Every structure is written in C-alpha cells, then in structure tokens.
Image: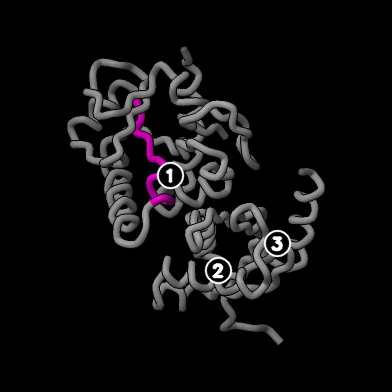
C-alpha cells in the first residue's frame, strides 16, 4: 500500500557527551528532548517530526522532517552546556533510512 | 572546507581540511576596524551591524563579511534569537549588495569546533541558498590563501 500522507524523513546519527562522558539512556533522552524543545519552542518542535530512534553508549539516531533536517543539525550543534557541564551533540551522518544511518555511522567510527 | 579559529594547535574535525588561526591571517579585520581600501579582507564585527554603503564598498574591494558560529552557539534564549536575526538581515543585505560571506567557528578551544555538516547547516539556517553555500566555501579558501 502506498503511503500518501506520510512525511519524508531524515535519520541523523549523532555522538553525545556531557563533560567528556556518554550520559545514561534516561539522562540522554531527557537532555535531547529538553534541548530541542527549548530551541524550537512547542510549535516548532511539533512540526519537526522529532523522535529519538535509539541511543546507546553515547551514540544514537534521531528522526526529523526531511525539509527541516538542517535546522535539526543546527540545533544539535548549538548544544554547548547542560547542568553547568560542557556538553556536545555532534551529528555524524544523515540518511533516509535507519539502517543506512547506522551503517554510515559505524563506517565513520571505523575510520576514526 | 576551511575553518578560521582563534587558537593554535587545534585538531580539524570531520570534513574540515584545515584550521587557520585568525592571528596568522593578515587580511583578517576585527574589533570594528574601519573599512579601508584593503582588498580581499575578511571583516568580522561581533555586533553584525554593517551599513549598506559599507557592504557595497566591501563588495567592490572583493572583501567578505565573516559570520561566526560561536556567537550563536554560546548565547542562550532571546540573545541567541537576536544574533540569528541580525545574521539573517546581514545575509539579505550581502545578497543585495553582492558582498561575499564567509562562515567560521572562531573556536578558542576544542569543544567549540564544529564539523563541516554543522557549519553547512548554520549557513542554511541563516538563509543561504545552495549556490551561495558553494560560493562561500570557495571564498573562504580564496581569502585564506593570503597569510602572514
């Protein structure tokens, strides 16, 4: 069945660290949701199609609307501090599928 | 892609070919320096307040205006909104006058560095079109060619 009303998605693989250490899953999800909400506001956040797909040991994947993925990356780049600690959310790769985003992120990890 | 920073000895992040220290660039002008007849210079003002006449002069001299990522990232709330809005106005004015724009992080420490993807998204957010993004990348490479 062809999905007509579905929005086009982009999956962004990222690296997250607070004070140089990867936060726990619960802390990371709390941090990411709060940061995006404060950056975009409630209305902007609702149109972003944002979702945390997975997160483990400082690495994860988020989903956003294809047309707004530059804004999502910019928002991630604007994270500099969390609870008075230095924080960094670095986008690594973006792709149209979760599988490819994960695969490309692994490749980048291998290179570095 | 190149990036201009404010410190020495930093490692380039993903997608950045080279980091160039602003102190080593002889054509880098900050601290509200007057727009003299300096050809191919990079002008940076923290206030992002340029008059249209100044931008026209910069365009005729082949100089560029620098927009720094650190000014946005290290602000919060309303202040960040104001800086972004000033940058958007400046981009619009540069487009009208034909003045070149370059984007950099002006990082002072490793945590302030951003990768190529992040700088590109910053360009998109302030309103650059795909052809202007390419032109900006070429401009920074050309203008950073002249070093002390």
Q: Are marks 3 and 1 in contact (CB under 8 Å)?
A: no
The circle on residue B59 is none
For label 1, count other residues whose C-alpha is less than 10 Å away and answer few (under 14), some (14-19) or many (20+): some
The answer to whether residue A55 is above or below residue B40 is below
Q: CA distance from mark 2 to mark 1?
A: 20 Å
Choose between A7 and A16: the one closer to the eye.
Answer: A16
Given the image, what chain letter belongs to the residue carrying mark 2? A
Q: Give percent across and percent down for residue B60.
A: 28, 23
For label 2, count other residues whose C-alpha is less than 10 Å away and answer few (under 14), some (14-19) or many (20+): some
Left or right: residue A97 compared with residue A73: right
What residue is disc 3 on? Answer: A59
Q: Is residue B64 magenta?
A: yes
The circle on residue A32 is 2
Q: Give percent across and percent down for residue B133.
A: 48, 42
Q: Residue furthest front?
A: A84
Residue A31, by quadrant, is bottom right
Q: Residue at x 23, y 18 (%)?
A: B36
Image quarter of the C terminus of chain A: top right
What residue is disc 1 on? Answer: B70
Q: Give percent across and percent down for residue B111.
A: 55, 45
Secondary element type, mark 1: helix
Tags 2 and 1 on a common chain = no
């Amino acid at each position: 069945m062809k999905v007509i009303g579905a929005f086009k998605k982009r999956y962004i693989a990222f690296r997250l660290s607070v004070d140089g250490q990867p936060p726990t899953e619960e802390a990371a999800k709390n941090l990411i949701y709060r940061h995006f909400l404060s950056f975009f506001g409630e209305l902007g956040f609702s149109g972003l199609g944002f979702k945390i797909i997975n997160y483990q040991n400082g690495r994860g994947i988020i989903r956003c609307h294809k047309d707004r993925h530059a804004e999502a990356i910019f928002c991630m780049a604007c994270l500099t501090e969390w609870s008075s600690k230095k924080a960094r959310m670095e986008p690594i790769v973006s792709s149209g599928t979760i599988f490819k985003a994960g695969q490309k992120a692994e490749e980048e990890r291998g290179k570095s | 892609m190149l990036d201009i920073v404010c410190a020495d000895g930093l490692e380039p992040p993903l997608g950045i070919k080279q980091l160039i220290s602003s102190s080593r660039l002889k054509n880098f002008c900050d601290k509200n320096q007057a727009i003299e007849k300096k050809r191919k210079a990079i002008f940076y003002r923290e206030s992002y307040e340029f008059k249209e006449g100044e931008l026209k002069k910069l365009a005729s001299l082949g100089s560029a205006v620098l927009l720094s990522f650190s000014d946005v990232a290290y602000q919060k709330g309303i202040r960040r909104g104001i800086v972004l809005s000033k940058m958007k106005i400046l981009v619009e004015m540069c487009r009208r006058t034909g003045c070149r724009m370059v984007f950099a992080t002006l990082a002072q420490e490793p945590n302030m560095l951003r990768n190529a993807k992040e700088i590109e998204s910053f360009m998109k957010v302030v309103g650059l079109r795909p052809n202007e993004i390419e032109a900006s990348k070429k401009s920074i490479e050309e203008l950073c060619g002249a070093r002390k």
